[in-house]
Amino acid sequence: MRDCVIVKWGGSLITDKESMCTADIEIIQSLAAVAKQCLDEGLDLILVHGAGSFGHLRAKHWRLNEGLLRSNNFNTQPDCENQKQAVSIVRNEMLTLNHEVSKALVELGLKVSTKPPHKWARNTGSNFDGDVTKTFYDYQNSICITFGDVVDCDGEREFGILSGDDLVVRLCKDIPNVKRLVFAIGGVDGILKRPPSIAKPSDLIEEWSSGMNFEGVHNSEIDVTGGIGLKAIRGSEVAQLGIEVLIVNGSHPERVFSACIGENVIGTRIIA
């Protein structure tokens, strides 16, 4: 059985997070080329991508991560009047971004299989309800792709956001031959001791374990799923399974490839 790598493309990496529904096609294409390299190296690869401006901005406005808020008076948007409409729109926006991701891979001659979470998963957090092994039955014959999404939830919440960072935990637990998990993030080289705006290269934390402090910047005005702090926590959960976990700067595709094949690379290794 070949080794499998789970790769998470951060939403802020593959989109312009300040502009609604704007993909960074150049970055997506460069990362797709890395995915092809991984397959050429004999790896299986499952891809999870974030939302960035295809979801976070609208989800933040409508507070979709909190579920159905019956008594809240929201300011309507020109194309959206209520939360339930927002759920449908965000799901479609995510499918649009996924189309760009899939297109870049297909153009390189790769076979892809998309797994939209709202079609197979329910509830939020890494213990969400959904049959991973059944859904990803074809991961050894194609690049399976999934992504952060708005999913149905039990009870009065009715819906919530299932983060890609939660999806990767379950994939690492349920897929039998996962060797490593690689987070490709935008703008920074890994987990830093200080905020990126004032950090020096020496502030990169090369090995991080739960309990160590860092000053990650979480843009709460946009991101509704936890930022780099959640990646660190979820990465620590995965490391406890005996799986290698790395956070690297996805703006340098060669680093993503090196991380995927187990080479030493600039970034943060998360240890149990």
Image (cartoon, rainbow, N blue to C red):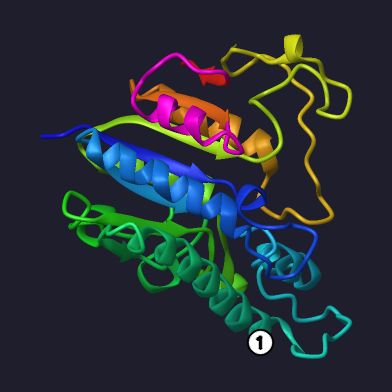
From this viewpoint, is residue 126 visible?
no
Q: Residue at x 74, y 70 (%)?
A: 20
Viewer-proximal residue among 168 and 42: 42
Q: Residue at x 76, y 16 (%)?
A: 193
The x, y position of residue 222, in whole percent, is 78, 56
User: Is 25 left or right of 72, judged from the image as shown?
Assistant: left
Q: Dot 1: what SS?
A: helix
Answer with the quarter of the image where residue 53 lies.
Answer: bottom right
Q: Amino acid at mark 1?
A: Gln
The x, y position of residue 194, in whole percent, is 82, 20
Q: Residue at x 33, y 48 (%)?
A: 46
Answer with the quarter of the image where residue 239 lies.
Answer: top left
- Residue at the left extreme? 1
Q: Residue at x 66, y 36 (%)?
A: 228
Viewer-proximal residue among 44 and 131: 44
Please tell me whether residue 104 is drawn above or below residue 219 in the rendered image.
Answer: below
**Residue span colored magenta:** 249-266
User: Is 51 left or right of 263, judged from the image as shown?
Assistant: right
Q: Which residue is mark 1?
A: 85
The x, y position of residue 254, in whole percent, is 48, 30
